[in-house]
Image: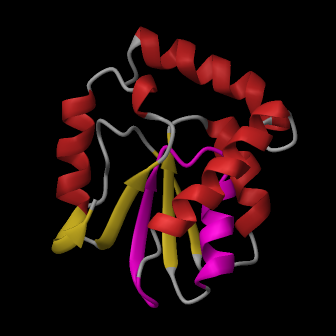
Amino acid sequence: MYSEYQKKDQEHFSAWAPHFDSGLDGIFFRASYRAVLKAFLPQSHARVLEVACGTGGFIKALLKKEPMLSITGIDYTPAMLAEAETKFKNDPRGHLVQGSAEDIPLREQFDSVYCLDAFHHFQNEDKALEEMRRAVKQSGVI
């Protein structure tokens, strides 16, 4: 199902997952969240997809800023999704799906689709963009 590159990438992120939020890298990502939140805030009640959501840190930040969103996060690393699950197990606004950016199993459901700090991990960036276009509604934003 996944390429050799993707399997190696999954191994890397599986090792990183337990300390992703709390390590030095987490400091960088939280700083980028603040910058992105100034530029990207979907309208209340929007359905949003985060591609390569990792541990769900930005989903959590976005829901704190706009609590009436419904956000789905997709990531292909089970260990990252397991960390994200701890943030959303009792929160119906956050949904998690295992899958690849190059093969998003969701179609024309979302008002907004975004991806932060992950494009350099995709083998086929054009395919990932094509998949994002298929996941967003015709009137939606990527």
The image quadrant that residue 130 belongs to is top left
**Residue 108 in view in this figure:** no
How far across and how far down the image is residue 57, in percent? Answer: 69, 55
Is 46 rendered above or below residue 86? below
Is 93 rendered above or below residue 50? below
Is 2 rendered above or below residue 22? above
How far across and how far down the image is residue 102, in percent? Answer: 30, 35
Q: Residue at x 55, y 89 (%)?
A: 68
Residue 46 drawn in magenta: yes
Q: Nearest the camera: 69 or 116?
A: 116
How far across and how far down the image is residue 105, in percent? Answer: 31, 52
Q: Nearest the camera: 43 or 39?
A: 39
State how the image is colored. Answer: secondary structure
Determine whether, in the image, residue 120 is placed left or right of residue 96: left
Q: Which residues are magenta?
A: 43-66
The image quadrant that residue 25 belongs to is top right
Residue 63 drawn in magenta: yes
| The C terminus, quarter of image | bottom left
Q: Residue at x 33, y 69 (%)?
A: 112
Q: Nearest the camera: 121 or 117?
A: 117
Q: Residue at x 50, y 79 (%)?
A: 70
The image quadrant that residue 120 belongs to is top left
How far across and how far down the image is residue 85, in percent? Answer: 71, 58
Is 54 rendered above or below residue 84? above
Determine whether, in the image, residue 71 is placed left or right of residue 129: right
**Residue 22 in view in this figure:** yes
